[in-house]
Image (cartoon, grey):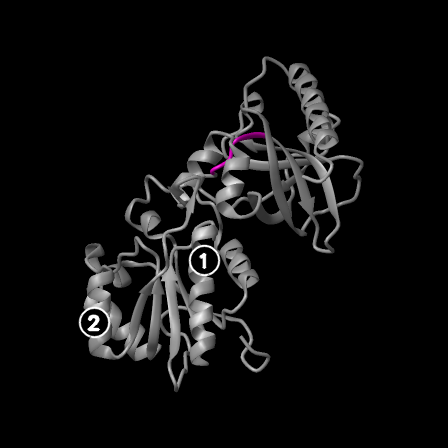
Amino acid sequence: MTASNPFRIVHGQAARLDFPAGCVVTLGNFDGVHLGHQALIRAAAQAARERALPLVVMLFEPLPREFFHPAAPVARLTRLRERVSFIQAIGGVDVLWVLPFNSALAALSAEAFVTRLLVQRLRTRAIWIGDDFRFGHRRQGDFALLAHLGAQAGFTVSAAPTCLVGGERVSSTRIRAHLQAGELVAARDLLGRAMTLCGRVIHGDKRGRQLGFPTANIALHRRLSPLQGVFAVVMSLPDHQQFRGVANIGTRPTVDGQTARLEVHLFDFAESLYGQSVQVVFLARLRAEQKFESLDALVAQIRCDVVAAQDFFADEPNP
């Protein structure tokens, strides 16, 4: 990536894409942008530098599983905005091409996917894929087919080595399992960073303020969250200030909540955050969400949660 060709995001199959000399491509879902994804993108970026070509990252929104199984959506690790941010932070990417995963894209045969998108649109000269990548209608395309089509069309195909942690393959599925079990350190080891959720602070029902624990309510924009329960967290504000606190993700059964929310109570903080985009970093799971018999019982437990979070930070001064 150069100053004359900075990182940019384009959307849709009609996006303006002009690579006279061709480009290097990598593609996938990249949910979580975990260590395996990072290694793949860095390998593609190195190949692009060696060829003096731009690197294009293709990703799909929604995730294919969300399209094919809308009644049973996956618990997303990252929203689109988070994926974009994490991919940009890796460096070396010139263009992020966001393709809507819809019926038209799902119906493309593997051969048509290669011809229309990789050859005609991108003039691909080299492509890097993950070890489990499948493409085309009914996932008929694999590495062997892509290499065969590439030989005909004039591009090379490379697969990034499998990324292992603890002797097991790094995957979004494995990370979700750790998060759902409250194993944040294990998830962090696969992500390469602590689990982070981003969102805008919105108006809630002000119940936390009424109970003596004002909270920032962050819009999740997820049908399902991989996290649930009460956590010790650090919130980063747009000006990069960071504040410690305790967060709850769940439906708030004590007050008959219906939808999952992320609510964060910050220690020693009294400013308004409405409308600001924040990042919440999850460091330790304190307990599962539960229903209490009364608001007094809930308040007593929140006090305990605050103490537990503060104890965590006392034991981990630089979490």
Between tags 1 and 2, which lies in front?
A: 1
Q: In this rendered view, identify the residue nearer to me: 310 or 249.
A: 310
Image point 36% across, 56% down: which residue? 161
**Residue range corresponding to the magenta coloring:** 226-230
Which residue is at 56% across, 45% downward? 197
Percent across and percent down for residue 90 are 54, 61
The tag on residue 39 is 1
Which callout, 1 or 2, points at the residue further toward the start of the chain?
Answer: 1
The location of residue 253, given as percent across then percent down, is 53, 23
Mark 2: amino acid: Leu
Query: For residue 229: magenta?
Result: yes
The residue shown at (60%, 38%) is: 282
Q: Amino acid at mark 1?
A: Ala
Magenta segment, prevailing SS (helix, strand or loop)? loop
Secondary element type, mark 1: helix
Q: Is residue 238 above or below residue 115?
A: above
Q: Give residue 271's quadrant in the image.
A: top right
Report x, y in % for residue 53: 44, 79
Q: CB under 8 Å between callouts 1 and 2?
A: no
Side (left or right) of 117 relative to 274? left
Find residue 70 and report its image quarter.
top left
Q: Secondary structure at mark 2?
A: helix
Residue 14: image location, x then y, percent = 37, 74
Q: Which residue is mark 2?
A: 149
